[in-house]
Image: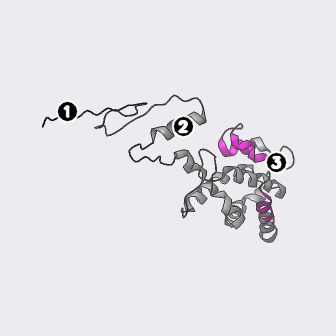
Amino acid sequence: MEKEDAKIIINIDKAYNVNPAATVVNNTFNISSGREAADAVKEALRTPHAGLEPASPFDRMREPEENVDITPIRTEILNYVSRVRPLLTDEAKSTYMKMWEDILALPEVASKVYKPGKQWGTNFHRDLVANILYHLRTRKIYKVVYKDNYNGAAMCEALEGDRDHSVKHALRDEPPADVREAIDKLLKEKY
């Protein structure tokens, strides 16, 4: 019996790593849009041998995993909102952080604030936090005001160091009705 030489043919559509002995792979993508970025990362992370595609890192940003320890995220939120402290009236400064701790403990807020949604660069729902900051203007806690007891540009700069950051739009909107009502009830009873 004659032994035939085994031939293996591999068709490579795109090669991200052609060195099987490599211990580190650095892929460089020149991408012009967010959609292209998501597609490129999804394709690069594909596992063709198993026939499965792992979840995209972008999917991970949409919904948090269940049973995640929210303590560090809560601390991150408190650090974030503390950035506006220089914009507060002297009277508001003494209770501001305690008030935020109580706001984050509200079930209506907690059920939403720890889910970042499609927002980039944050572990919490930054737009909801911005909506709440906007809603708190009704308490007249801000000393740097433009109109309606509020200065959105100053708030955006205090939070992000940039008056044109994307959070600026959320700093002009009220939070959802259930959140607003829960906060108003808390503030009326406790502050």
Crowding at dot 2, Cα within 10 Å, few <14 / some 14-19 / many 20+, comes out as few
Residue at the front extreme of this rendering: 1
Disc 2 residue type (three-letter): Asp
Residue at 28%, 34% in the rendered image:
8
Q: Which residue is mark 2?
A: 39
- Which residue carries the number 3 mark? 150
Disc 3 versus disc 1: nearer the observer: 1
Q: Amino acid at mark 1?
A: Asp
Q: Is residue 57 magenta?
A: no
Asked which secondary structure carries label 2, the reply is helix
Q: Is residue 83 visible?
A: no
Q: Earlier in the sequence, mark 3 or mark 1?
A: 1
Which one is closest to the eye, mark 1 or mark 2? 1
Name the residue beneath numbered marker 1: 5
Amino acid carrying mark 3 in the image:
Tyr
Q: Is residue 165 visible?
A: yes
Q: Secondary structure at mark 1?
A: loop
Q: Which residues are magenta?
A: 154-181
Percent from the top left, x then y, of residue 55?
51, 48
